[in-house]
Amino acid sequence: MKKIFFCILILFSVSSYSQDELSKGKPAPNFKLENLDGGFTELSKVIGKGPVLLNFWATWCKPCMEEMTELNKIYEELKEKGFTLLAISTDNEKTIAKVKPLVKSKGFNFTVLLDKNSDVARKYYAQQIPYSVLIDADGKIVEVHMGYMKGDEKKLREKILALLK
């Protein structure tokens, strides 16, 4: 019984720690990932130009596809004003080959990054997808959101617009 209690206590501590690490106003952890062109994108090189949205997703995730279709519309509307969208695929070695064809077929124009080992997903505590982190131009976390329901994109768009002002 003591072992079970101790395990629950540890799990609670870890989940509390993760929430504290990604709380509003904290600096977003830096990372460098391969993009679909074979180059690399580093978060610190993107910060400072405007708000950045990190969107963790996978090819097999239906809500992710719905959300990304809406995010592409927001990106197209706001990219000239300084908004950056980094869609981070959490596909593993079994499904990673599907990423580039899917992105091309859907006409997504934002930057897609490959987190093949889920290192960045772990760094951002993205335990379920879709999972988004909105970062301001100073590199501070503004919002963390898990899941997707139709209409979420409207609230997100308003938050991005506020950061662009």
Image (cartoon, grey):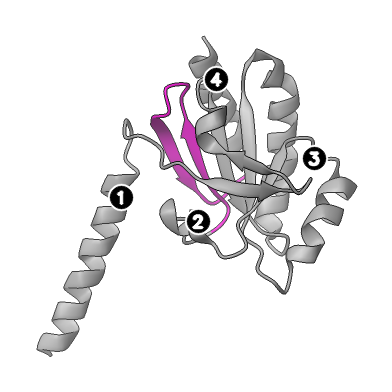
Report the residue marked by disc 1: 19
Q: Residue at x 71, y 15 (%)?
A: 80
Q: Earlier in the sequence, mark 2 or mark 3?
A: 3
Q: Residue at x 14, y 79 (%)?
A: 6
Report the residue marked by disc 2: 121
Instruction: Tell whether 140 sits left or right of 111.
Output: left
Is 132 covered by the magenta stretch? yes
Report the residue marked by disc 3: 108
Please name the amino acid that badge 3 sits on. Answer: Phe
Q: Earlier in the sequence, mark 1 or mark 3?
A: 1
Q: Nearer the viewer, mark 2 or mark 1?
A: 2
Q: Is residue 157 above or below residue 151?
A: above
Please name the amino acid that badge 4 sits on. Answer: Gly
Q: Secondary structure at mark 3?
A: loop
Question: Which range is magenta?
Answer: 129-151
Q: Earlier in the sequence, mark 4 or mark 1?
A: 1
Instruction: Tell whether 95 sits left or right of 1.
Output: right
Q: Nearer the viewer, mark 4 or mark 1?
A: 4
User: In the figure, residue 39 lies in which quadrant?
Assistant: top right
Q: Nearer the viewer, residue 147 or 51?
A: 51
Q: Earlier in the sequence, mark 2 or mark 1?
A: 1
Q: Estimate the spatial distance between the alpha carbons at disc 2 and disc 3, rounded to whole Å.
A: 21 Å
Please name the amino acid that badge 2 sits on. Answer: Ala
Residue 53 in percent (x, y) is at 56, 35
Q: Which mark is residue 34?
A: none
Q: Estimate the spatial distance between the alpha carbons at disc 4 and disc 1, rounded to whole Å.
A: 24 Å
Q: Nearer the viewer, mark 3 or mark 4?
A: 4
Tell me, yes or no, if residue 155 can be seen here.
no
Q: Estimate the spatial distance between the alpha carbons at disc 2 and disc 4, rounded to whole Å.
A: 22 Å
Report the residue marked by disc 4: 50
